[in-house]
Image (spheres, grey):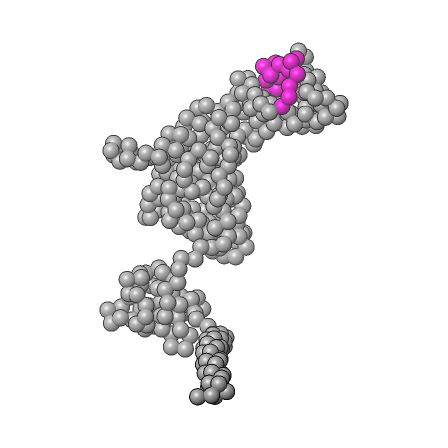
Amino acid sequence: MSYAGSEKRGNIFEYVRYLEDRVQQLEAEVEFLRRELNYYKGEIDKLLAAPLVEAVLLELMDDGRAIVRSSAGPTLVVNVSGTVDPSKLKPGVHVALNQRGSTIVEVLPIVEDYYVRAMEVDERPKVRFKDVGGLHEQIRELREVVELPLRAPELFSKLGVEPPKGVLLHGPPGCGKTLLAKAVAGEVNATFIRLAASELAQKFVGEGARIVREVFRLARRKAPAIVFIDELDAIAARRVDVGTSGEREIHRTLSQLLVEIDGFDPLDRVKVMAATNRLDVVDPALLRPGRFDRLIEVPPPDVSGRYEIFKIHTSRMALADDVDLRKLAEMTEGFCGADIKNLCTEAGYNAIRRNAETVTMGDFLQALDKYTVARFKGRGSRPEPRMSI
């Protein structure tokens, strides 16, 4: 065989290998394009498909059909698709209905109301019981009524004692009711759900009661949990026979709250805390045993309490040697914890205005003089503090 013939045959083999490689590349490209085509066909089918209808399963019938309440309003008797797991079909679950055939095609996951979900405190407050001054008895009661049943429920089961369901903190404004709730949230390893009672006063009929149900449903699902309702008197005022439509709606919300605290569904490991400045206007139905069993008064601090509060709020301040916290506590008769905190802040501003590096007793006296005039002038509810030392 000549050299030219062998060279020609080698070129043909190389060309055949090139064609084979090229065919493989084209086949891979065709497969990729086929997948792309199927994907976009599926997307088009989704866009053209009729939407599914949400419904709540009410009851399963003996013949395999189900009774559901559609989100559109009517109650329907529908079939169940063979692709749905029968073990997941329980009364109360949310399902998806095929709009064309009204058939259950999917069991929907639990959907929490976004408004209620926002009430859950994800990041725990940094406040602890040691940061609360002058309320030793109140802290002791909260530990016994709220913290202990959640941490050691077996103690109560062993003795056959049912712990209190609810705690109501009451007292003048600024004395530490909300601060105690923050301390409980920081101390107890439990889900903490906080809401203001004014958030339950909704515009539409039944909306406030629905929010109450959703809040307690979330608390039961995430037990152990604490539900804290601030400014309870906004929805818990004494009920009367006559009133506006808005007042009647608030009464419906209150009735739902009463049912959730002491109804047929047990609270289990859910504790209810509330705070109010107006215990005298709260409906008596909330204050009876079985609902808010323990009423804890949070009064204005005495001298030793004010001294502890001063120590807490000045712990990070650069104080001069002449600052006498004990004397300041004696001079601030009638001050609550919030007043003392503002007084310390104002004293710090006085030092800043002087470009000083420490806060002196004079800064506190100047702040006390200013705060007394601005805060208590013309008020008869709190006595004027003594200005002499």
In the rendered image, residue 16, in percent from the top left (x then y), is placed at 46, 83
In front here: 330 or 317?
A: 317
Question: Which residue is farthest front?
Answer: 2
Residue found 39% across the figure and 46% down from its top: 222
Tell me the quarter of the picture where residue 330 sits: top right
Question: Which residue is farthest top?
Answer: 389
The question of residue 364 being in magenta is answered with no
Residue found 43% across the figure and 69% down from its top: 53
Tell me the quarter of the picture where residue 69 sits: bottom left
Residue found 33% across the figure and 63% down from its top: 58
Tell me the quarter of the picture where residue 110 sits: bottom left
| Residues rendered magenta in the picture | 317-334
In the rendered image, residue 191, in percent from the top left (x then y), is placed at 42, 42
Residue found 25% across the figure and 32% down from its top: 159
Q: Give above or below for 120 relative to 113.
A: above
In front here: 104 or 240?
A: 104
The question of residue 325 being in magenta is answered with yes
Number of marks in the image?
0
In the rendered image, residue 22, in percent from the top left (x then y), is placed at 49, 80
